[in-house]
Amino acid sequence: MTRSFEEWRRAQACRLDAWRSAFREGRKQQRYWKDDKQRLKAEYKAARKAGQVPEDPGPPANGFSLLPWLLMGMGAFSNLFQGKAANPWIGGLGLLTFNSLYIYVVFHAFAKDRRDALQTRLALAGLGTVACALALGYGDSWLLFLPLFGLATGAVLRGRDLRTLGTAVAVLAGVIACVRDGWDGLTIAYATWISTMVTAAILSLSDAVRELRAAREELARRAVEEERLRFSRDLHDLLGHTLSVIVVKSEAARRLAARDMDAALSHVTDIEAVGRQALTEIREAVTGYREGSLVTELDRARSALTAAGVEPSVSRSGPPPEPQTAALLGWVVREAVTNVVRHSGATQCQITVTGSPERVRLTVADNGAGGSGGGSGSGTGGDDCRPPRVGTGLTGLRERLATAGGSLTAGPGPRGGFRVTAELPTALSPEQPTELSTQAPMHQTSAPQEPTDSAPSVAVGPNLGP
């Protein structure tokens, strides 16, 4: 007996401990839930204040929003049941007809194609006929069907003729009301005109707000697409040039390491600098604050060509271009030099910048295999079969220059080799986007020592850049 009581007591104590533990856990979760709720509310308010959360437009307007106005006919309905209306069967049939036509019209008034349909206009005309007949026949509370007819008219007729038609409906309602109730009927005319105009104004404003919200969402979607395109172009141009320089300098360092350690270390130092600068440029490209400098790109091009065993020749003449124009030309130099290093198999490359007060021209020409052929080459010599070198990089640059009012052409040169020519206005107007106008200048890498051997072999691909 004692043992059974002890077991029962221990079981009850265990059950009580379990309840207490569950209760404490529940209170703990409740506190967590309250804290999370407060935090989410604060974050949502901050996001709404910053404009990052779109406002909820709510459900679209429909005919249900105009149905409560039918309660204005309750006076006429009560007259039928109280026997105050003559010919109650005719009045009841007219009331049923009016309500049916009103419901049909207002539910067809919220879609433009249904609102402009012939059936809706005929139903509106029938509604007006029934309203005028009931108001003339019974008067008193039945005159309130005229403002209801005006409300339906404003819901259907939203356009240039609304003022004329709304005034005509109000005048008609005033004449009928004055015939029944004398000059006191002018209030019915005023109520009819107000219901017509206010209903049309509110519904038109609601449609305009929804169209503006839809346009804003479409603009936001296009902005996201354009930003993705900008980033993909920047990343392509950055990595294409940087990786090509790293490959060329790595091969030069490998060839020179056995006999000239100082020259090899110079190339390794350049590789480190190029890699660090690439990391910085990629971070800046993500935030959209990169800018190419023409002078810096020309120095980098000279360094990359020298490391690849290509003799560079850079010449400039004329007034310097504006920063935005120079930024775009810097991208052309970067892409064209990457093309020469990776695909041309050239031994010489000439870069010419010629400026005038109106336009500036940049030409990058090499003496390589040009853009003809269809096979693949090693990239070290003058193979007579090479793939075309107009790829995604030049396509993106052509689009950028065309947006800024310039042009870009690429193809075999008149004396062989490959030529890239870009033309731009010396000063871009503020309306012309360049996608590069808010970027930071790049750092210059040290010029490496010119290797004594021939150009290193670089794999050839069908496109310009990676």
Image: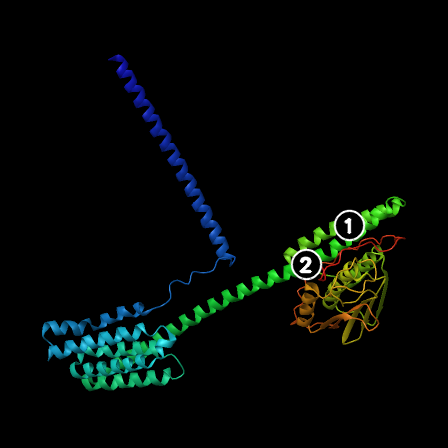
> Considering the numbered disc 2 on the image, is that residue within a helix, a strand or a loop?
helix
Q: Residue at x 23, y 83 (%)?
A: 129
Q: Residue at x 41, y 43 (%)?
A: 34
**What residue did someone put label 1 on?**
273
Q: Say which amino acid is labelled 2.
A: His
Q: Quadrant of the N terminus?
A: top left
434 on left or right of 336: left
Question: Can you see residue 141?
Answer: no
Location of residue 155 by image quarter:
bottom left
Q: Position of residue 156 (x, y in %)?
A: 34, 78
> Considering the numbered disc 1 on the image, is that residue within a helix, a strand or a loop?
helix
Label 1, label 2: how far apart the Cα atoms are: 19 Å
Q: Earlier in the sequence, mark 1 or mark 2?
A: 2
Q: In this orientation, which residue lies closer to the viewer: 63 or 272?
A: 272
Q: Say which amino acid is labelled 1.
A: Ala
Q: In this orientation, which residue lies closer to the viewer: 458 or 178?
A: 458
209 on left or right of 221: left
Question: Can you see residue 324?
Answer: yes
Location of residue 444 by image quarter:
bottom right
Q: Residue at x 47, y 69 (%)?
A: 212
Q: Quadrant of the C terminus?
A: bottom right
Q: Position of residue 154 (x, y in %)?
A: 33, 78
Q: In this orientation, which residue lies closer to the viewer: 395 or 231?
A: 395
Report the residue that reaches farthest toward the top: 2
Dot 2: within a 10 Å radius of its alpha carbon, few (fewer than 14), some, or many (20 or more) residues? some
Circle nearer the viewer, 1 or 2: 2
Q: Residue at x 14, y 71 (%)?
A: 78
Q: Position of residue 51 (x, y in %)?
A: 51, 59
Compared with 191, 48 (above or below) is: above
Q: Which mark is residue 308?
A: none
**What residue did someone put label 2 on?**
236
